[in-house]
Amino acid sequence: MSEKGTHVKPITLHVDFCISSGACVLECPEVFALGDDGVVSQIDPQPADDLLPKIRQAAAVCPVSVIEVADD
């Protein structure tokens, strides 16, 4: 988390569509993880702004578009 309080806009996870590919975790392990059930979760509820490029890349590589990042 950022100490200055600058955080990424809200992230929505459409977990019902998650197919457990793990691509998001490979791209941004600071923010995303796969649970024991294989479904993605957001492990950092308020990721720092400097992680935005990695978060957007994680969203882009998800084969079923589970991750949605609010626009600026």
Image (cartoon, rainbow, N blue to C red):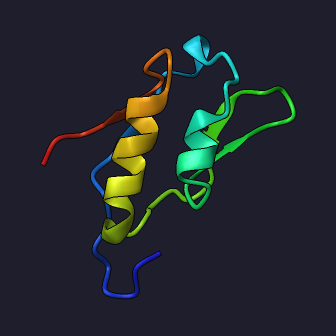
Asked if residue 33 is positioned above or below residue 65 in the image, the reply reads below
Q: Name the outermost residue toward the right.
A: 36
In front here: 45 or 58? 58
Q: What percent of the width, then of the height, locates residue 67?
A: 44, 31
Image position of 53 (left or right of 61): left
* Residue displayed at 34% across by 44% down: 56
In front here: 37 or 22? 22
Q: What percent of the width, then of the height, locates residue 11?
A: 38, 42
Asked if residue 29 is positioned above or below residue 10 in the image, the reply reads below
Quarter of image, res 70: top left
Q: What percent of the width, then of the height, locates residue 14?
A: 49, 21
Quarter of image, res 49: bottom left
Image position of 5 (left or right of 24): left
Q: What percent of the width, then of the height, locates residue 27?
A: 53, 48
* Residue displayed at 38% across by 69% down: 48
* Residue displayed at 87% across by 34% down: 36
